[in-house]
Image (tube, rainbow, N blue to C red):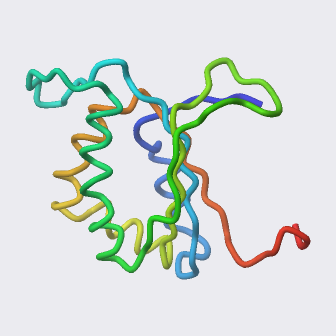
Amino acid sequence: MIVENKIQPSEKQIKEFQQGDTSTPIYMLNLLKFKKRAIYDDSRLTDLSGAEAYGVYAGEVTAHIEKVGGKAIFSGKVSRLMLGEVGDLWDSVALVMYPSRQAMFKMTQDPAYQASAIHRRAGLDGQLNIEVKGGLGIDQL
């Protein structure tokens, strides 16, 4: 298994995200790795750590998620790896529900969201964003 953290999806991933079932609820599992120091696209000077810059984004993104009918379900700091091996452990995880792929995509295109996302890009060293379809109990996997 190859694991490669990224800041933005590829063109192929964006295209595939807009195909198939785009109207049923999804959960996005975010595995987050932060930069030691935030680096802003606009070259502003800052003393923020990557985690602190991402925290600014996190403080703003909940309103954007709710605007499209979504909900931030859970977030927390990674404390250890219980099973398996990875070269470098993620710093935090977040789980967000969106009513559909369409809703999530609409959010990402909103200029107000894009203004908040500058803090996301400044703080993240990379992430995995895994789409999960809900509705199954653990005994129905």
* Residue 68 image point, x, y percent: 34, 77
Q: Name the residue: 58% across, 53% down.
A: 29
Q: In this view, does 26 lie above or below 57?
A: below
* 80 or 67: nearer the viewer: 80
* Residue 53 image point, x, y percent: 26, 35
* 14 or 82: nearer the viewer: 82
Q: Is residue 110 above or below residue 3?
A: below
Q: Is 84 displayed left or right of 110 in the figure? A: right
Q: Is residue 84 above or below residue 139?
A: above
Q: Name the residue: 87% across, 66% down.
A: 141
State the quadrant of the N terminus: top right
Say which quarter of the image contains residue 48: top left
* 129 or 52: nearer the viewer: 52
Q: Is 34 displayed left or right of 96 in the figure? A: left
Q: How many labels does the image show?
A: 0
Q: In this view, does 132 lie above or below 13?
A: below
* Residue 73 image point, x, y percent: 51, 65
Q: Is 101 displayed left or right of 24 in the figure? A: left
Q: Name the residue: 89% across, 73% down.
A: 140
* Residue 17 image point, x, y percent: 52, 61
Single out the residue that lies furthest toward the right: 139
Say which quarter of the image contains residue 25: bottom right
